[in-house]
Image (spheres, rainbow, N blue to C red):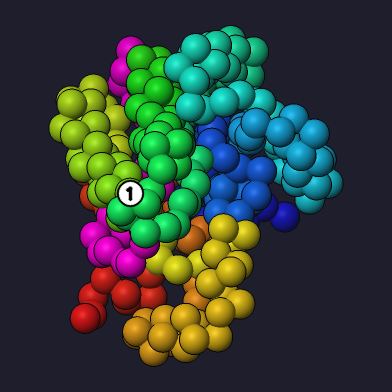
Amino acid sequence: MTTTLPSGLQQFSLSGKLALITGSSGGIGLALARGLAAAGAAIVLNGRDAIKLAGVAATLREEGYTIHEACFDATSSASVDTAVARIENEIGAIDILFNNAGIQRRGPLENFTDSDWHDLISTNLNSVFFTARAVAQRMIPRGRGKIINVCSVQSELGRPNIAPYTATKGAVKMFTKGMAIDWGKYGLQVNGLGPGYFKTDMNMALVADEKFTEWLVGRTPSRRWGDVEDLVGAAIFLSSDASRFVNGHILYVDGGVTATL
């Protein structure tokens, strides 16, 4: 028996859509991939480790989802251009792009190395530009498309020993607004998803730090760490027709951290 969704809920369906998610072989990217797939989208997973990517893709296929793989380096303009062209030619038109690839580097600012600085800029900022540009060049002639850049509470707030990371995420926030301004006239919606503190591999040292966890839970109105599944609803909203008049917006999913001192 086929159940017809109420018209309001139909706006959130991603059936028939193809979504490319960079950095999606683990952590937040994998949660986004699983969530968008559950809403009906076909997913193009991305990562630099082909073996790991294939394993994740196999797991998601076993769960009943339509999954493709694109092993490329999002920090390389040439690699991105080649991969996006292949996806469009061999798999289909990209309807949704999630720029999720990102890294963290911590340390005293006065001792921060050139290497760590360039790694952050390359992964957290350059990849957003390279991938968004390649995908937008194909979305613009079609007159439609969703680009969602993964920002952070550090797009708004600082913390000790992560000033360069904060700089990259602040830049992604403003780049998101700039993309919306330049590409909105072509029918594209470009928005940001801003996670707060989530239990991911990148944050496991902080999760294990009892003093930090006590501080964070007390600082967060929702009084807990975020689980990556908490991001799925917002991701589906920004990817779907439900957000068709939302542009240049950063949607923070942070348990209220950005709302309080």
Residue 148, magenta (yes or no): yes
Of 253 and 206, the residue lying toward us:
206
Q: Left or right: 251 with respect to 105?
A: left
- Range of residues picked out in magenta: 140-161
Neighbor class of circle 1 (other Cα within 10 Å; few <14, some 14-19, many 20+) is many
Quadrant position of residue 77: top left
Quarter the C terminus occupies: bottom left
User: With respect to residue 106, does 18 lie above or below?
Assistant: above
Q: Is residue 40 above or below residue 35?
A: above
Amino acid type indicated by mark 1:
Pro
Q: Is residue 181 left or right of residue 17?
A: left
Residue at (62% x, 59% y) in the render: 201
In this orientation, does residue 64 appear? no
Q: Identify the image quadrant of residue 129.
A: top left
The residue shown at (23%, 80%) is: 260
Query: Which of the two residues, 106 or 222, is positioned nearer the viewer here?
Result: 106
Magenta stretch holds residue 195:
no
Q: Nearer the viewer, residue 181 or 100?
A: 100
Seen from this angle, which residue lies furthest front? Answer: 111
| Position of residue 209 measured from the top left corner of the image (x, y, whole percent) | 56, 79
Give how far across and how far down residue 254 sits, in percent.
38, 69
Task: Tell me where residue 159 sits by quadrant.
Answer: bottom left
Instruction: Tell me the residue at 33%/49% (across/down).
Output: 164
- Where's residue 173, x and y in %? 26, 46
Residue 22 visible somewhere in the drawing: yes
Tell me the quadrant of the picture where the N terminus can be found: bottom right
51 to the left or right of 173 = right
Dot 1: what SS? helix
The structure residue drawn at horizontal position 46% and vertical position 51%, both measured from the top left corner, is 105
Mark 1 — residue? 164
